[in-house]
Image (cartoon, grey):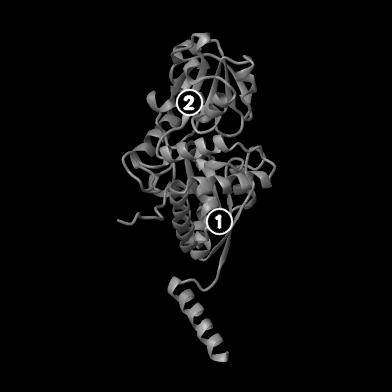
């Protein structure tokens, strides 16, 4: 019995040494919105033990409009957080030294939608109309889209509801392809009853979701950052390859926090996240921030007064993951 226990302990110790982790590091991650399939990779990395394999215990916090990434930078309430690229660039320009350590989204999911009966087929038709745009930190690009075309419209601030659109209280609504657009379809409006304008088709194919941390945190915890990113990407890959299991886990998170959960909607969201995250023609994620795309986003924000200076690419983005060949 004593020999068996000794052998067991020796095996455990050797496995721990092989992995190179002398302890389990506890880190906090804040998603930039409420729990939903938009963040599936993080849930699956935790659920399947990928974070523990990387020597990490990850506390996934409750995000959303009342727990923003700006707040977590200011009060140091999270170690890692997700954010739109445009919002992170704006935050950096304002003195929040957050750095991008993994760019998940590779294309835009932003859209403007209107009902066909309103006759608003082109952006130029938006002039003088009521347009709903979020009032929760994701306004930069929707507003720039209008400014680029000199569209003078009445901006209606909203949080996340589509009710105004359904009741005809607004003419146009800014939506995410993976979220509010499908909510509108679920509410009984057919896709052929909508005019849809994808930002990506109108010269604003800007990537969105990325993973960030404070610069000082990265300097002091580079290995932790690399392990977190590698395990997270492993979680996303698993989520895309095991979608039904993933949706079960997502809905479990939503139920735990009393967030209304619809399986069909969460399945749509996961499918669309795969569309925007995987490079065209690839089945593997890269986690890379393309420098030309970054410069394009930065120049657009600078031109329209969102920032005073484009952060240096080498300072703003740190490559922490290189895909295995």
- Secondary structure at badge 2 equals strand
Which numbered disc covers residue 47? 1
- Residue at image point 64% right, 52% down: 77
Distance between the alpha carbons at the discs numbered 1 and 2: 32 Å
- Residue 111 position within the rendered picture, expressed as x and y whole percent measured from the top left: 48, 25
In the displayed structure, 4 sits above or below 297; it is below
* Residue 15, position as x, y percentages in the image: 46, 75
Task: Determine whether 59 is above or below 251 in the image.
Answer: below
Q: Which mark is residue 111?
A: 2
> In the structure shown, which secondary structural element does the residue marked by tag 1 occupy?
helix
x then y, percent, for residue 243:
48, 45
Residue at image coords 46%, 63%: 223
7 and 234: which is toward the camera: 7
Nearest to N terminus: mark 1 or mark 2: 1
Label 1: few (<14), some (14–19) or many (≥20) C-alpha neighbours in 10 Å: some
Q: Nearer the viewer, residue 189 or 282?
A: 189
């Amino acid at each position: 019995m004593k020999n068996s226990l000794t052998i067991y302990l020796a095996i455990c110790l050797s496995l721990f040494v092989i992995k190179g982790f002398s302890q389990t590091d506890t880190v906090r991650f804040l998603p930039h919105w409420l729990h939903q399939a938009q963040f599936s990779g993080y849930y699956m990395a935790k659920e399947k033990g990928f974070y523990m394999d990387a020597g990490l215990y990850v506390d996934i916090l409750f995000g959303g409009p009342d727990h923003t990434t700006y707040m977590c930078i200011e009060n140091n309430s999270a170690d890692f957080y997700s954010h739109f690229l445009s919002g992170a660039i704006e935050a950096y320009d304002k003195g929040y030294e957050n750095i991008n350590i993994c760019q998940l989204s590779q294309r835009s999911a932003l859209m403007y939608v209107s009902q066909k009966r309103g006759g608003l087929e082109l952006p130029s038709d938006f002039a003088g109309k009521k347009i709903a745009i979020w009032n929760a930190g994701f306004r930069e690009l929707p507003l720039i889209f209008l400014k680029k075309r000199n569209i003078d419209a009445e901006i209606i601030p909203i949080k996340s509801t589509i009710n105004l659109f359904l009741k005809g209280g607004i003419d146009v609504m800014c939506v995410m392809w993976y979220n509010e657009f499908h909510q509108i379809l679920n509410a009984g409006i057919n896709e052929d009853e909508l005019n849809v304008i994808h930002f990506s088709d109108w010269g604003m194919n800007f990537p969105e979701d990325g993973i960030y941390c404070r610069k000082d945190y990265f300097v002091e915890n580079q290995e932790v950052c690399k392990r977190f990113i590698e395990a997270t990407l492993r979680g996303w890959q698993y989520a895309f390859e095991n979608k039904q299991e993933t949706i079960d886990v997502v809905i479990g998170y939503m139920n735990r926090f009393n967030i209304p959960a619809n399986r069909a909607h969460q399945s749509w969201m996961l499918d669309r996240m795969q569309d925007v995250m995987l490079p065209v023609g690839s089945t593997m994620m890269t986690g890379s921030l393309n420098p030309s795309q970054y410069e394009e986003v930065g120049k657009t924000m600078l031109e329209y007064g969102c920032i005073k200076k484009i952060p240096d690419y080498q300072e703003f983005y740190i490559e922490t993951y290189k895909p295995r060949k």
